């Protein structure tokens, strides 16, 4: 790769898109490492097993991956600046919906068990069904606003400000429904 070493396409070895998130990268690694592991009699391949490990080690660290991506783009012509359709479709409205879902999810957990209100990050991200990058953005935003916190156990929990926000948003939604119902009634009477 560098220093006279030939270029190795780590994405091809792991059979993933260069734009895949960390979760997709790890899933591909686990699948292929298991398949080619020397202990797996039917599909064992030590050479491929070592290539998979090398590729994953080169890409799993964000800094190393960013450096590799520069080389990858140079060698393959791949354009990392173009967004995937799914990413392009994301908007501030989508983010606001995700924030509300997270807060309602954590609010419900707090109501069910006020003393042990934490939820593992995995479950919250699974509920949202979003990429690692998008999930980290949502967590950063909600933590910075003081609406959620990381508990001593490393779980996510809603804060007092978060509870107040959910209540305020619920009241606003109820007012909007009442106004819409009143407007429909007025139109029906006219």
Image (spheres, grey):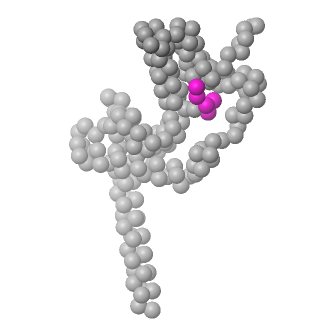
Q: Residue at x 46, y 49 (%)?
A: 98
Residue ranking furthest to the front: 42
- Residue 103 vertical placement versus 181 (above, below): above
Q: Nearer the viewer, residue 144 or 122?
A: 122
Residue 180's spot in the image, x, y percent?
Answer: 42, 75
Does the magenta run of residues contain 17? yes
Q: Nearer the viewer, residue 13 or 182?
A: 13
Residue 43's spot in the image, x, y percent?
Answer: 48, 14
Q: Residue at x 69, y 40 (%)?
A: 82
Q: Residue at x 46, y 8 (%)?
A: 38
The reply, left or right, for residue 13 in relation to residue 43 is right
Q: Which residues are magenta?
A: 15-19
**Quadrant assignment, res 109:** top left
- Residue 124 vertical placement versus 47 (above, below): below
Q: Across the whole image, how many numbered discs are drawn on residues? A: 0
Q: Does residue 54 appear anywhere in the picture?
A: no
């Amino acid at each position: 790769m560098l220093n006279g070493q030939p270029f190795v396409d780590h994405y091809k070895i792991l059979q993933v898109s260069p734009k895949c998130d960390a979760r997709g990268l790890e899933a591909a690694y686990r699948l292929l490492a298991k398949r080619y592991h020397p202990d797996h009699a039917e599909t064992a391949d030590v050479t491929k097993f070592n290539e998979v490990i090398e590729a994953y080690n080169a890409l799993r660290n964000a800094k190393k991956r960013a450096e590799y991506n520069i080389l990858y783009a140079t060698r393959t012509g791949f354009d990392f600046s173009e967004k995937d359709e799914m990413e392009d479709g994301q908007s501030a409205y989508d983010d606001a919906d995700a924030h509300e879902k997270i807060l309602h999810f954590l609010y419900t957990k707090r109501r069910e068990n006020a003393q042990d209100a934490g939820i593992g990050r995995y479950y919250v991200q699974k509920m949202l069904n979003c990429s690692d990058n998008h999930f980290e953005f949502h967590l950063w935003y909600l933590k910075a606003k003081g609406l959620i916190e990381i508990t001593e156990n490393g779980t996510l929990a809603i804060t007092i400000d978060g509870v107040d926000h959910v209540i305020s948003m619920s009241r606003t939604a109820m007012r909007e429904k009442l106004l819409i119902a009143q407007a429909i009634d007025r139109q029906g009477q006219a």
